Amino acid sequence: MSRTGRRPGAPKTREDILVAARRAFGDRGYEATSLRSIADKVHVDPALLVHYFGSKDGLFLAALEVTVRPSALFSGLSSLDVREAAELIVGRYLAVLDQEQTRDVVLGLVRSAVSSERAATMLREFLLEEMLASLGTLTGHPDGQLRASLVVAQLIGIAMLRHVVKLDAVVRASNDELVSIVAPVIEGYLR
Amino acid sequence: MSRTGRRPGAPKTREDILVAARRAFGDRGYEATSLRSIADKVHVDPALLVHYFGSKDGLFLAALEVTVRPSALFSGLSSLDVREAAELIVGRYLAVLDQEQTRDVVLGLVRSAVSSERAATMLREFLLEEMLASLGTLTGHPDGQLRASLVVAQLIGIAMLRHVVKLDAVVRASNDELVSIVAPVIEGYLR
DNA sequence: CGTTGAACTCTACGTTCGTTGAATTGCGGC
DNA sequence: GCCGCAATTCAACGAACGTAGAGTTCAACG
């Protein structure tokens, strides 16, 4: 009975680790997630994670690396009027939060940003380069950057209430319902 | 030279601990804050904290206990029209975030909610009983609860971007600027 | 079929953490 | 001035953590 050494077959382990890590970081944030707990879920020794990713930090970076293409949130909006654009943005965002893989990444960033300066920086740069760049040009306002940031604030707040705080009204609302209420507000920011 | 035993004079230590704890939990959240680090800042032995508060959990609860009376956010709004009410809410909220003591509590709740289920529950109940109760009655909408929650989402999002992610545009904006942009949006939710 | 390197586990180290129990010192009432 | 109780520190515990190093098994290629 060999407990040590390489396993037969083609290894899928590395990808398994990344999936479990994404999930764990998304569920509990960077600080509260231990390498050992991730390793347990993949039925693997903690040292293997270090072997693959160098450190907990490295695993964190690898797990949350651009699985989310935020430009997809904002593609093909320029030809629309502000009203339709706002609806699309909110709808696509909610879809991202519905899908397990991408939700883990978004929540991982948000959850970890509050306890780790590094994660906060990741999130900040992510928001700046990807979202605000696209959004900022959507409006001709002189304070376009600020207005775009407030849109992001609204979206992040929704993620917080729906998936972290789990506030009943927000959890229970359907995506369509949310879009119909939130989109006009986003519209207000962009116009 | 007596390093142990009671100190002469009237002890202010307990309150010092609470202040430092509030600050620490507000800065780094529950998980990332150690009893030892708080004890250090008060120049006191970690064991004293558990002597006073029983456990880290007890200290957390004591530190974040109702220093914020959110009803103040919403008092005296009923006589105003929706527009003025929205401006008052946003303005008062930003003032809460400006004052060190209350900001620590709000950020402590938010930061800790993401890594501790207990803190998430605290924040949820806080929001439900204090904010949504007041806000929900402000509007006659059938989905008043949801609309009020989205107002809260917007406000929490602003706190996140301004104090956690430290997104430039939001950090630099003046309170007046923020009020003038955000209030109409809140108004949209409540109307 | 032998070799090399990748995939994996074991053990163990040094830290840090929350918490405990006992000891020490000062305060306030009798 | 004595006594009980409050305030405080000390030393230590067991657990959990991230990580390092050495060892074992397998796959791929010559």
Image (cartoon, coloured by chain):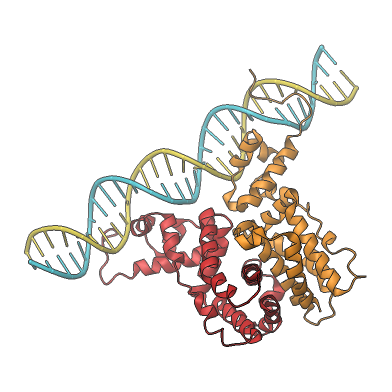
Chain colours: A orange, B red, C cyan, D yellow
Residue ID at (72%, 75%)? B169
Measured as percent of width and height from the top left, residue B179 is found at 66, 82
Is any atom of residue A111 visible in this view? Answer: yes
Measured as percent of width and height from the top left, residue B165 is found at 66, 66
Q: Quadrant of residue A126?
A: bottom right
Q: Nearer the viewer, residue B29 or A73?
A: A73
Q: Quadrant of residue A154?
A: bottom right
Q: In the image, is residue A98 above or below residue B99?
A: above
User: How many labels sit on residues?
Assistant: 0
Q: Quadrant of residue B9?
A: bottom left
Q: Nearer the viewer, residue B106 or C27?
A: B106
Quadrant (top left/top right/bottom left/bottom right) for the C terminus of chain B: bottom right
A52 vs B42, left or right, is right
Q: Nearer the viewer, residue B100 or A121?
A: B100
Measured as percent of width and height from the top left, residue B4 is found at 28, 58
Measured as percent of width and height from the top left, residue A107 is found at 68, 55
Residue ID at (77%, 65%)? A90
Is any atom of residue A118 visible in this view? Answer: no
Q: In the image, is residue A24 above or below residue B58?
A: above
